[in-house]
Amino acid sequence: MYLQVFEHPQDVTREELNKDLLLLPLWRREKVLSYRFLIDQVLCAKAYLLLKNGLREAYGIADNPTFEYVRHEKPVLRDYPDIHFNLSHCKQGVMCVIDDHPIGCDIEQIEETLDLNLCHFCYNDDEVAGITSAEDPCVEFTKLWTKKEAALKLTGEGINDDLPSLFTKDVLESLMFDTIVRKDNGFVYTVCRYKNPKVTNET
């Protein structure tokens, strides 16, 4: 697995972004510039460049990656269907993961206060209890959120209204998670993979 995180995208200047734009294919440059705010342009540009750099470092691929979109608009590499990737970003960081098997990831900002209404909307009673009793409920909330979103991005389902019942026993037994807390930089990220990817790919 290849994993890379770009930290502090909020510090990127317009001049630095302009240099990044020169490294992008026209279609991605147009997508970047379709966003109104600088931070959103930076996130879009950096996510693509992390993928481009990862494909070069891990697979020796120097071409600009081109996407196709499958179920729920999940992007896949048009010219390299056996290489799997996932991108995620928040205002504190941008991440990219690449692997030979399906993979999902999510990076999220740690909020300063816990929104209990949102907590009950996203999580079941046991999960809420675990969050509210944790030493740092905001970190615990974010850890669980990144796990759920990474899992949904792995399967290609995307965020839905059934988050509280997402992690059934069978689902949890089929997945493995790597979660990193970067409290100093204000974010948490999680990578999600199948425990048995060969069986999953064949079914």
Image: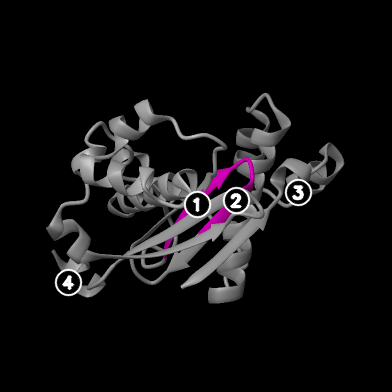
* Viewer can see residue 175: yes
Q: Secondary structure at mark 2?
A: strand
Say if residue 157 shows up in the picture: no
Mark 4 vs mark 2: give the one in front.
2
Mark seen at residue 199: 4
CA distance for labels 3 and 1: 17 Å
- Badge number at residue 87: 1
Q: Which residue is mark 2?
A: 94
x and y percentages locating residue 2 in the rendered image = 51, 71
- Pointer 1 and pointer 2: residues touching (CB < 8 Å)? yes
Residue 67: where, in percent of width, then height? 46, 49
- Across and down, in percent, residue 1 comes to 46, 73
- Would you place residue 185 above or below residue 158 in this image? below
Q: CA distance from mark 1 to mark 2?
A: 8 Å
Amino acid bearing label 3: Asp
Q: Secondary structure at mark 3?
A: helix
The amino acid type, in three-letter code, at marker 1 is: Leu
* Residue 193 numbered tag: none
